[in-house]
Amino acid sequence: MIYQGKQKIWSEYQKEIPDDHWFYVRSCIRQSFFPASEAHFVKIVRDVLGKDLYETKHHTTCGGIAYHSDTIPQETAMTIVARQFALMKEAGYKNLVTSCITSFGNYTEILETWREYPELETRIREMLWKACRREFDKPEYVAHASDLVYKFRNDIAEKAKVRLVNHETGEPLRIVEHIGCHYSKMFPHKGVGGAEYPCVLSGMAESWGGQVIDYPERRHCCGFGFRQYMVKANRGYSVSNTHKKFESMEPYHPDAIITNCPGCPYFLDRWQYVISEQTGKTYGNDGFGIPVFTYEELAGLVLGYDPWDLGLQLHQVAAEPFLDKLGVAYDPEAKYLGINKEDLLKPALPRVLKCF
Amino acid sequence: MEAARQLMRLGWEPVIVEKSDHLGGHVARWHKLFPDMMSASELVEHLAAGLDSATIYLKTRVAYMNKLKDGYSVMLSNGTGLQCRAVLIASGFSLFEAAKKEEYGYGVYDHVITNADLEAWFNGADDGRVPEAPRNIAFVHCVGSRDLKAGNPQCSKVCCMTAIKQAIELKELFPEAEIWCFYMDLRLFGKKYEDFYINAQKDYGVHFVRGRVSEVGEAIDGRVVLKAEDTLSGAPVKLKADLLVLMSGMLCNSDSASLAAMVRTEVDSDGFLRSRDNIYRINESRRPGVFFAGACTGTKTVPETVAEARAAALDIHNYLNGND
């Protein structure tokens, strides 16, 4: 591997990311899968980095899931997106930051479509006005939330309580990065580092002390892929995609996976349980899996937040072996205690995949 | 070089202006030429031998050219001024920059090279990317050719045959190696080309897979991992190779456009220089006294370039004698 070759490509795919004043739109499914990730993104941006991040309760889905599942036409998704832009205009913001990768792809695709077909934008303006009497301005900048964390990765590193280093051996932890398909595969120049060798996540991992692994199936889909999973008959295809990735990364012995998509951490995490039940195989050490983190969770760990406040107990794959490598203190008894110490009840443990 | 040789034979005094430190262009850096496996250096030496008394400026560029009443005033980068009655542009081509096809990993993975790198290695250059005893070698055809996304829709014409030639040369060096050529179409239009292709299969056992390589990665042992589709069997293909050779296509030399601008002739929609027509006046520009030869007007093989050089020399001879 020629690292300088990647650096040369990265230099061609750097996007302008404004410093401050962001209108934040949350993800539909991340709030169910990894609710603490968004909460900690807001906390890190506002409290640690001291930036202005605004959100409104009137924000809705962007329509991306329905659009990619062929249940609504693109014009409908465009009108929904136009309403989000109207909310942003009403709040006085010009920089949009999305939590969801599919939303980021959806917003980007719609803006590019309007750029090429301005008559369509005019039609959507009319439809929005008829539907809810709102008007919108297009955002000056659209970023994914991981772009912001990438931009401020070195500020986070300066404030880090732990680094991505094995605290016993001093060796950097081996990190697999996996970007969501809708981040830069549709529009490579809209993602930091492009589509083939993205550096939005690898840049974070390296800044925080980790060693990034490149492996043959790095670009392969996590297995979500909308129709692979949403059409029930295709779910075998979904898990086979994930299986292919784990077989490919296994020889590199990764310590963790970092992701920036709603679907990827969920499927890379949950399918490890399914693969272990189907084949008896696990990919971590001693019967554990490879923990899969959102970039907010990893940033939170680096900044010293409590693992259970970060929601790591909601992962199928146990995070404890990774926490032990980091040297992060945690209370095993508090794992399944929710807000106000409410007992969340311990889930049944899998037959093969080792968990706590 | 060939046009100058012919013009000298016809009694004229050509001046060759070459930007590099040697004559012969890409051919001078090539090893063997298809389909006869003729030595490229022998051809260049043969052409150069006829130019002993010619005026040649190496490491020199054309600074500007101005139209005179009866010819052109040419100022060179070394300060020399020339009064020429005709100008022959033979600025050739550039190779497509393979790193632009990021998915193939040129400049990123350890064992990915281009057709030009391989020719340099055949000629004795050290290249750590070529393993000592490769067992699997893959070629990807049409890298930056017939590729709208790369901004280069035209066929580069020579890559299919060059890949076959290079595969044969590698097979002769490494008889135990398996060689795989991934192609869109095989365009084997010239004399002996089809025979050459059949020999590559029958006598050398080169494998031809009809399908594009979608991406290249690197395995833990440093080998390159190719993913492709075999469109004839309708199946995805995955191959671990010790060496991957990218057949970089031809682009018009970027200097050609500035030369064209100096003499106010046109660049065609494909980026190459525009001939008077593409049927029987390919050597002629739309400006009086300005002629073309070789790959500055489009992708060409070596025999085509040599033939065009002779044709251009005759056109210039007729023009100078007032017989056009």
Image (cartoon, coloured by chain):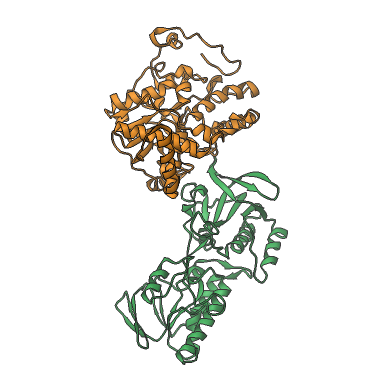
Chain colours: A orange, B green
Counting from the top left corner in percent of width and height, residue A236 is at 64, 29
Name the one closer to the observer, A270 or B110.
Answer: A270
Counting from the top left corner in percent of width and height, residue A348 is at 56, 11
Query: In which quarter of the view is residue B267 placed?
Result: bottom left
As drawn, B94 above or below A189:
below
Query: In which quarter of the view is residue A43 placed?
Result: top left
Q: Which residue is most to the left? A: A50
Q: Which residue is most to the right? A: B202
Q: Can I make out residue A165 in this image? A: no
Image-based side of B21 in relation to B81, left or right: right
Residue positioned 52% across, 19% down in the render = A316
Residue positioned 31% across, 32% down in the render = A90
Image-based side of A138 in relation to B152, left or right: left
Counting from the top left corner in percent of width and height, residue B185 is at 64, 58
Residue positioned 50% across, 60% down in the render = B152
Q: Which residue is most to the front? A: A130
As drawn, B51 above or below A179:
below
Query: In which quarter of the view is residue A308 placed?
Result: top left
Q: Can I make out residue A181 in this image? A: yes
Name the one closer to the observer, B118 or B61.
Answer: B61
